Image (tube, rainbow, N blue to C red):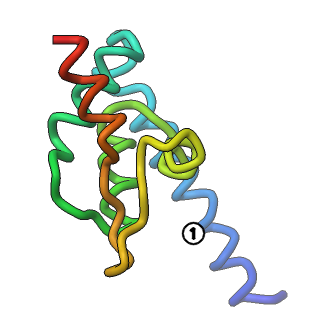
Amino acid sequence: MDLPRMQAALRTIARGFEELAASLGEEGDVPEEERTARVIEEWGRRGLTQKEASALFQRHGFAPQTTGGWARGDWVAIGEDGLRYLTAKSHEWLEERQ
C-alpha cells in the first residue's frame, strides 16, 4: 500500500468535491453575462495573483481556469509584477453594459 499516493489522491478528490459544491451555489441560476459583470466589478483595477483570480471566478460560478481563457481573449493581462489585471476591453464591456 502506497500511503503517500493514496493521500494525494484523496486530496485531489476532495478538491474536486469542493469545486462541484461551489458550482452548485447560488450563482448557478445567474446568467453568465451577469456573473461576468460581477467578476469585473469585484476585480476592479487591482492586480490579483493566479490563486486570487481563480478564487474570484469560482465565487461567481466559473471554473478556476477561466482566467486563462480571458487572457487569450484579451480580457486579462499579466503585469510585469506577475499579477493579473483586467484590460481596457473588460472595463469597456462593463461600461457599455451599464
User: Left or right of 93: which side holds 76?
Assistant: right
Q: Dividing the picture into quarters, in which one does residue 13 lie?
A: bottom right
Instruction: Identify the image quadrant of the N terminus.
Output: bottom right
Instruction: Identify the image quadrant of the C terminus.
Output: top left
| Residue at left offset 35%, top offset 62% | 84
- Residue 61, given in percent of the width and then of the height, sits at 39, 31
Residue 90, relative to residue 4: is it above or below? above
Q: Dividing the picture into quarters, in which one does residue 39 lie?
A: top left
| Residue at left offset 34%, top offset 26% | 36
Q: Nearer the viewer, residue 28 or 68?
A: 68
Residue 73 visible, this orientation: yes
Image label count: 1
- Residue 85, given in percent of the width and then of the height, sits at 31, 57
| Residue at left offset 33%, top offset 70% | 83
| Residue at left offset 72%, top offset 88% | 3
Residue placed under numbered mark 1 in the picture: 11
Residue 64 visible, this orientation: no
- Within 10 Å of disc 1 (Cα), the crowding (few <14, some 14-19, many 20+) is few
Residue 5, relative to residue 32: is it above or below? below
Kindly identify the amino acid type of the residue bearing the numbered disc 1.
Arg
Q: Nearer the viewer, residue 3 or 57?
A: 57
- Residue 58, given in percent of the width and then of the height, sits at 38, 42
- Residue 67, given in percent of the width and then of the height, sits at 48, 49
Determine whether the residue tagged by mark 1 lies in a helix, strand or loop. Answer: helix
Residue 45, relative to residue 83: is it above or below? above
Residue 2, relative to residue 58: is it above or below? below
Q: Residue furthest right?
A: 1
